[in-house]
Amino acid sequence: MNICIIGIGLIGGSLAIDLKKNGFASWIIGVDNNPKHANEALQLGLVDEILPIEDALQNVNLVIIAVPVNQVARMLPRILDQVDHRTFITDMGSTKSNICNIANAHPKRQNFVASHPIAGTENNGPGAAFSGLFKDKMTIICEKEKSNNLALKLVEKMYQGLEMRTIYMEPEAHDQHLAYVSHLSHVSSFTLGLTVLDIEKTRENIFNLAGSGFASTVRLAHSSPDMWAPIFNQNADHLSEALGAYISHLQNFKNLIDNHEEKKLNLLMKRANGIGAVLQGSEE
Amino acid sequence: MNICIIGIGLIGGSLAIDLKKNGFASWIIGVDNNPKHANEALQLGLVDEILPIEDALQNVNLVIIAVPVNQVARMLPRILDQVDHRTFITDMGSTKSNICNIANAHPKRQNFVASHPIAGTENNGPGAAFSGLFKDKMTIICEKEKSNNLALKLVEKMYQGLEMRTIYMEPEAHDQHLAYVSHLSHVSSFTLGLTVLDIEKTRENIFNLAGSGFASTVRLAHSSPDMWAPIFNQNADHLSEALGAYISHLQNFKNLIDNHEEKKLNLLMKRANGIGAVLQGSEE
């Protein structure tokens, strides 16, 4: 099967490696508006060739859009315009309401499968791609009834080949949930980084003292701004609600510290410990 | 050398393993007010015997206090009372001002070395102890000029044997810095856990959607409340300042999201990315 992957970064590149490896793809065409990334993807052997998008969309069975969500929104109508009825399209975007709304306004909506594989690291670019990124993770397909049945089956088969578990959700529910379990923790990590960088200006060598706990909490602060700013923007309402709840918990915690309420702090933390048990019930 | 370790949990147990392994200790007496932990430490072979504290303090060269900081504050004067002038004492506490103030009020202050090895995991108890916890990490000794020179040399030698790098700081500076690079990230993680647990009550299966990024950010929320509540309480002033700065960054981030200021968000995150470069300059 001929596949076109638009955006050969961490996600697109890791897909390319494993879809080739498991035989799902026989020929992979890469598209990337960053010539350095395009060249790197070719040299790393992630893709078989690099083409301009117009040429890449001809004679492929599946187009995978793996670019930041603002670019998905911009490109999707144009791609749907250009493909024939036998070419199917899916996206990897971390927000779904905005992208589904755009797809729903297009006459070729049924060629498109809206999806979001929940996988990634704080690194980006073709050099960050690796085999196994998706294995044993969860993927979400939204509004499956709006996709052509063949398109849906093809994308489901692709995720199955990557050893992912597929679940189905409405775009609004997806965005609401992801605000809490993904987007919020990215904001908490970015702002923790900012807070400590501020203080570091005036207090030398503070980072000598940072333990592995700090490194773990701030890991997501290394993530790509070009990927995350559009996600935060498209999911502003849900994320704002989650941030409001988080700030309110922090303010409460700070008040207890200010009032030396050690016992109440202890009880709150015992409750927070419960996150461990709940997370063990999840896939990772 | 005969050593007494008070508190055979993650820290005390890991110390016991490596101090025996590297020959620093020939006989290790464990003290733990939790009989289950004491028994477990003995069965795991972490210590050679378990004794009540009064007996354990006799005929040992070094007493290592590895209990929560409120208990360090409570026990330290009593231990100093009981040991003879040839027995030295050090602690592993994550706060130093309070503990040093208490030590400074005791006539045998010079038998004591105030220290803090920056190492740990989110787990606790003797079962969490492992060899290598301290290797290549940083340790801090405070007010070294107030310790007997032999005591100081002994504790420095112990840390050297664990392959740690020792630095020297004033207790106040220690507490200020640790508020930012350790205590703050624990609060951010505990409150992130609380925020998501709140939402989970009403939204089923939200945790199916949690990726590895969330797990990493929330890892410290598994930490022991009995260890952390006293740390937050003893370091309330510095931690409150750090939390105030963090909340203000979060509020600013939320405002930008509410106003769809995508470019400004992008710039802020680019600045946060700088934490990566700074952390690489540190030990872990």
Image (cartoon, coloured by chain):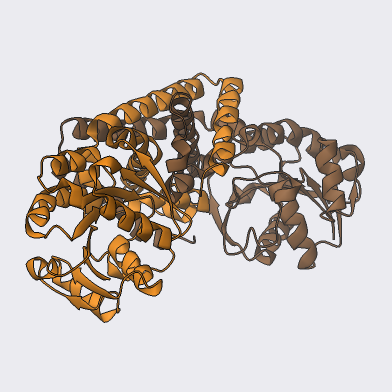
Chain colours: A brown, B orange
Q: Quadrant of the N terminus of chain A?
A: bottom right
- As displayed, is residue B145 above or below residue A157? above
User: Of B91 and B151, which appears nearest the observer?
Assistant: B151
User: Measuring 28% from the left and 63% from the top, which residue is drawn there?
Assistant: B12
User: Measuring 15% from the left and 67% from the top, which residue is drawn there?
Assistant: B34
Q: Name the image quarter holding residue A96.
A: top right
User: Measuring 26% from the left and 42% from the top, which residue is drawn there?
Assistant: B95
User: Measuring 35% from the left and 60% from the top, which residue is drawn there?
Assistant: B158
User: Of B19 and B219, which appears nearest the observer?
Assistant: B19
User: Of A85 and B107, which appears nearest the observer?
Assistant: B107
Picture mark count: 0
Q: Position of residue A64 (x, y in %)?
A: 75, 48
Res A96 seen here = no
Q: Position of residue B180 (x, y in %)?
A: 38, 35
* Relative to A171, A34 lies left or right: right
* Relative to A53, A73 lies left or right: left
Res A133 seen here = yes
Q: Name the image quarter holding residue A151.
A: bottom right
* Relative to A74, B218 lies left or right: left
* Relative to B135, A91 lies left or right: right
Q: Position of residue B177 (x, y in %)?
A: 37, 35
Q: Position of residue A100 (x, y in %)?
A: 63, 38
